[in-house]
Image (cartoon, grey):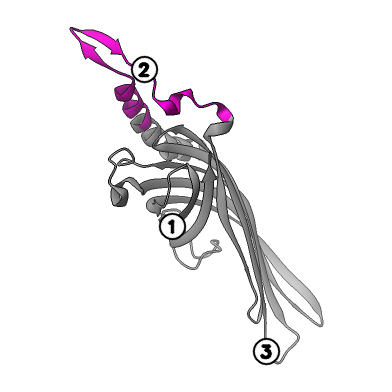
Amino acid sequence: MRSLLFLILFLPLGLIAQRNDDETRGGRDNGRVREEDPSPDEKLPFSKRLVFGGNFGLGFSNGWYVNLSPTVGYRVTDNFITGIGGTYIFTQINVAGSNTSYFQHVYGGNLFARYAPFAKTGIQMLSNLYAHSEYQHLFVVSGARNANGSIRESRSAPGLLLGGGYTTGFGRGPAFNVDVLYNVLWRSDNSPYPSPLIVRAGFSFGM
């Protein structure tokens, strides 16, 4: 099942990126392939293709909340990025007027791919749009604490997030990103999210 999800996640975007890359490298002249000079992006070393980012948060309101979700991506071409990420989210809610509190730990990892089909158009509103697909596998530990001790339960929550987003810069320099995704594997009995629709914001930085 995981292998099938991996193919669904990466194969379509990889084929699109490869096709665009082939068209960029050369054309045909009298039935022969005409090679062109490689683009500046093709000459970049590995370290210059890395893109770091993620979502991070900290809050205090009748309890507290922390979110550490870093990502590391690799810019395959000017308009295709793939990578991995990790997630740790802790939430605690204190019940007013009692010594009871509810808590939830969420941790896991993900594989993602982003493709910007209009990255080379030069039109900012279009070039900053991207398609996003992500397979994540999260583990959730939730429970309650009071004067008598604590109770907790654990569950697994796989997810396949599909959608798109907008960035102020695709893979180069500092950027602010907004994703609008739909989890097609969402289930109300195991997901840490209240809805299959996920809207999130984060930052990224690439050389």
Dot 2: element: loop
Q: Are marks 3 and 2 in contact (CB under 8 Å)?
A: no
Query: Between marks 1 and 2, how big is the CA–CA gap?
Result: 35 Å
Q: Secondary structure at mark 1?
A: strand
Q: Earlier in the sequence, mark 3 or mark 2?
A: 2
Q: How packed is label 3: few (under 14 Cα within 10 Å), some, or many (20 or more)?
A: few
Write the residue at 36% across / 35% down: 12
From the viewer's perspective, is the residue at label 1 or at label 3 nearer? 1
- The disc placed on residue 96 is 3
Q: Quick one: label 2, few (<14), some, or many (20+) residues within 10 Å?
A: few
- x and y percentages locating residue 194 in the rendered image: 49, 68
Which mark sits nearer the N-terminus, 1 or 2?
A: 2
Q: Which residue is the site of mark 2?
A: 37
Q: Earlier in the sequence, mark 1 or mark 3?
A: 3
Residue 13 coordinates in the image, percent (x, y) = 38, 36
Magenta segment: 17-46
Q: Is residue 100 left or right of residue 78?
A: right
Please name the amino acid that badge 3 sits on.
Ala
Q: As displayed, is residue 194 above or below residue 178? A: below
The numbered disc on residue 178 is 1
Residue 95 falls within the magenta-colored stretch: no
Query: Residue at point 43% right, 47% down?
Result: 169
> For the residue carrying disc 1, how many other residues have a C-alpha within 10 Å: few (<14), some (14-19), or many (20+)?
some
Percent across and percent down for residue 18 are: 37, 27
Q: Nearer the viewer, mark 3 or mark 2?
A: 2
**Residue kind at label 1, given as amino acid type:** Val
